[in-house]
Image: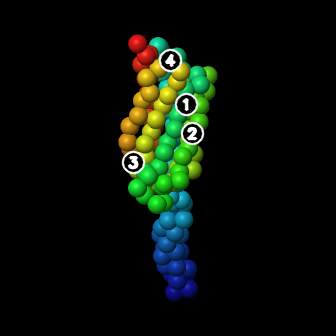
Amino acid sequence: MKTKLPLLFLAAAVPLLIVATAFAAQSGRSWMNGFIFADSDTKGLEGAKVELTGDQDNARLKSVHLSTSAANDGAYSLKDIPYGDYTFRVSAEGYLPYEIKLYVGSDMLTQIHVRLRRKS
């Protein structure tokens, strides 16, 4: 009888530990990455400006404005993004800007790849 009690306790404790770990891991913050292209389908556009602006009608996101520049291979990355609605914008000198509205989910990766068009 003594050996069954510890096994029963262990069988009940393990699922609780797994559930507690899953809830503790959620931060409400996400990350985003991708590539910016222009004249080539394989070579990125270095220096393109990538901006993520929070919904101006949402008090929690109103002041959120994240930005970065694309690396020499066109890659960009943004971290610690609160979940919610955003305007995503990419711009570079000599190219038409690209802009979309999007929703960033909690604790998720959002990947967006953009191809900019030259101004005529």
Q: Are marks 1 and 4 in contact (CB under 8 Å)?
A: no
Q: Amino acid at mark 3?
A: Tyr
53 versus 20 height, above or below: above
Q: Which mark is residue 103?
A: 3
Mark 3 residue element: strand
Mark 4 residue element: loop
Outermost residue to the right: 72
Between marks 1 and 3, how big is the CA–CA gap?
A: 20 Å
Q: Residue 103 appears at what percent x and percent y?
A: 39, 48
On the image, numbered disc 4 is attached to which residue?
Answer: 94
87 versus 39 height, above or below: below
Task: Work out whether mark 1 precedes mark 2 in sequence or the reverse, and give the earlier one.
Answer: 1
| Dot 2 crowding, Cα within 10 Å, few <14, some 14–19, many 20+ | some
User: Which is more toward the observer, 94 or 111?
Assistant: 94
The residue at 53%/34% (across/down) is 50
Between marks 4 and 2, how big is the CA–CA gap?
A: 19 Å
Q: Residue 44 appears at what percent x and percent y?
A: 53, 20
On the image, numbered disc 1 is attached to which residue?
Answer: 49
Q: Are marks 1 and 2 in contact (CB under 8 Å)?
A: yes
Q: Amino acid at mark 1?
A: Lys
The residue at 59%/25% (across/down) is 47
